[in-house]
Amino acid sequence: MTRIDLRNRRTVLLGIAAAAVVLFAAGLIVAYQSRNDHICPDGKPPISERQGILEPTEYLCHGGTIVTK
């Protein structure tokens, strides 16, 4: 049975932790860039939404406008 050197184990664990932090930060950046703040034409958030399983989500905006996404 071979023994793993403590320095190598620490290096591997630090590498895995660093990769996890980088991937988490990349996910946050992608989520921030792909957000959709303006669904309604007036820039306000929708009043209500109706989600469908197979159909796109319908949003009810101010003034009675319905937007599907």
Image (tube, rainbow, N blue to C red):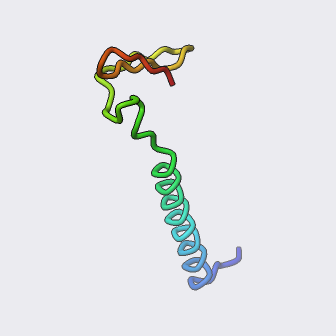
Depth check, front residue: 51 or 33: 33
Depth check, front residue: 25 or 37: 37
Q: Residue at x 49, y 58 (%)?
A: 24
Q: Position of residue 4 (x, y in %)?
A: 64, 78
In this rendering, would 66 be left or right of 17?
Answer: left
Q: Is residue 45 above or below residue 6?
A: above
Which image quarter: residue 2? bottom right
Q: Is residue 20 above or below residue 42?
A: below
Q: Residue at x 45, y 51 (%)?
A: 32
Q: Residue at x 54, y 14 (%)?
A: 55
Which image quarter: residue 7? bottom right
Is the N terminus in the top left, top right, bottom left or bottom right quadrant?
A: bottom right
Q: Position of residue 6 (x, y in %)?
A: 56, 83
In this figure, what is the number of numbered marks? 0
Specify the farthest residue to the right.
1
Q: Position of residue 34 (x, y in %)?
A: 51, 45
